[in-house]
Amino acid sequence: MRSLVFILGDQLSRDISSLDGFDARHDVVLMVEVADETTYVKHHKQKIALILSAMRHFAEELTRSGIAVEYVRLNDPNNTGSFSGELARATSRFKPHQIIVTEPGEWRVRRMMDDWSVDFDVPVEIRDDDRFMCSRAEFRRWAGDRKNYRMEFFYREMRRQSGLLMDDATPCGDRWNYDSENRKRLPSSERLPKRSTVEPDAITTDVLKLVAECFGDHFGDLETFGWAVTREDALCALDQFVADYLPKFGSYQDAMARDEPFVFHAVLSPYLNIGLLKPKEVCLAAERAFRAGHIPLNAAEGFIRQVLGWREFVRGVYWLEMPGYAETNALSATRPLPWFYWSGDTDMSCLSITIADTRRNAYAHHIQRLMVTGNFALLTGIRPSEIEEWYLIVYADAFDWVELPNTHGMVMFADGGMLASKPYAASGAYIDRMSDYCRGCRYNPKIKLGEGACPFNLLYWRFIAMNRAVLQHNPRMRIVYKNLDQMSGQRLQQLFREADEFLNQLDQPTPQREQQDL
Ligand code: DLZ
Ligand code: SF4
């Protein structure tokens, strides 16, 4: 045998670079389900089920096409439980001349790979992951000696380079960005088309059983599992998105609604991030729909900006700045994560709804993530590593390369502004404007102080005041500090007192938290 090609659980693409030049007469693919990956954080049950089922389907597809696959199941009695252990077993069994692998999406695993060639005494070729539209080298060139990175400039460069939504050298509609047209609240009369889910087949049913047995104490519901686990079904989800949701995705991109957890969002990120869909093809699908006159420009541009702009951008920042990136804590945030992030047990209805959606679907859309759970973590000063781990656990699409910059930089401003030009801090008024969550909440977003005041209002000004040293010279924060300085000392004192009372009860240890059912 010549090559052992090791394919990881988020590399489920037929054109993954590790398969380039694969010789079916001699080479073997290795895929492994291992305890280390399922438990290095306690992933949402649906996330584990999605990855394991998609891995099993992918292995079947490879086998059908004549590729020899060595597939190790989680409950195989000889399973060593780790990537390195399984690679060691496969190497001694197949005695390959070389091991080929595509670079992983996580620094932790990349470091592991450094040891493999010495440990197994076999050359290890680590290939670039060319499923992204911007390679790590191209991003490094773009970044040059910039001290901080702004998505908007990178995005324009990517538009020019890819030709997406371009009329020769000019952006379609003569504007790069239609963000200002993407902030409508969802009217209560708006009826959304029903989302279709994929009925579990025999493979998925087996995996669901396995996950229920082995990971019963992990966060999240399993009964609602309806993810696509094959490329074919992921392509159907893409078609449905373009036809039914994309036309209004632009206008309602930032809207939140208690009975519509997905609003008009694509919900394709898990498929993109494990390799069932390709970023270029989803962008092209949106562009085609626009050119054919089926969707408005603000929808096509808003969607393409997320995939071609933001997704590629955070991946570039991750690889450029790791491992030091994760260590920064610009706002010195040290509060432990409140227990209600797991239980959903809070009387702030925006948070309880978002957490319930997350538990049920292993998904929340970007404004729920940024402006509800994220905003609360920012305002209360949760320790970045704790909230990062939460995001990595609870979302089906969360892999370190994408989750970390989004949480550390965008949500928590822990990088001091390397990635975002100002913290995304907001009071209750923002949540009230963009959602129907406040209706029925025990608090009132219009009350700033005293009985019934929305905690976001108290916490917002406390956050602004407490972080003056770091933020006051930021040009985008100037008006905020001007407003703060106009508040009377007495008002500020009351605000701090009430905010601290709220925070003190947040810090109370919850009795019997271990017994609570996640
Ligand atoms: C996230 C995950 C899980 C839950 N399980 C596995 C697994 O059993 N086998 C595997 O190959 N990959 C898994 N993954 C995805 C890996 O954690 C992912 O490939 C690494 O984080 C590197 O990006
Ligand atoms: Fe959230 Fe405040 Fe609105 Fe309640 S009133 S839902 S806490 S923003």
Image (tube, rainbow, N blue to C red):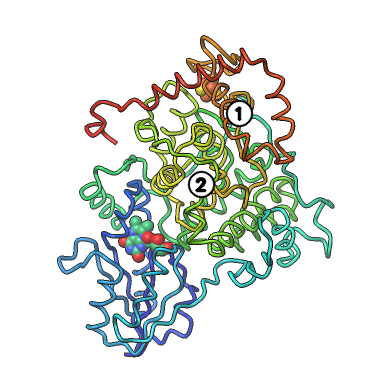
Residue at image point 54% right, 41% down: 331
Q: Is residue 439 above or below residue 250?
A: above
Q: Quadrant of the C terminus?
A: top left
Q: Which is nearer the N-term, disc 2 or disc 1? A: 2
Where is residue 256? Give x, y as percent. 57, 32
503 with respect to 188 (left or right): left
Q: Image quadrant of residue 465? A: top right
Q: Amino acid at mark 1?
A: Ala
The disc at residue 329 is 2
Q: Is residue 54 visible?
A: no
How many numbered markers are drawn?
Answer: 2
292 with respect to 376 (left or right): right
Crowdedness near tag 2: few (<14), some (14–19) or many (≥20) residues, C-alpha within 10 Å: some
Task: Look at the numbered discs 2 and 1 and tell me whether their residues touch, using CB distance below 8 Å.
Answer: no
Crowdedness near tag 1: few (<14), some (14–19) or many (≥20) residues, C-alpha within 10 Å: some
Residue at image point 71% right, 53% down: 152
Q: Nearer the viewer, residue 51 or 391?
A: 391
Where is residue 364? Give x, y as percent. 49, 40
Q: Is mark 1 within 8 Å of ligand 2?
A: no
Q: Is residue 125 above or below residue 338?
A: below
Q: CA distance from mark 2 to mark 1?
A: 18 Å
252 with respect to 318 (left or right): right
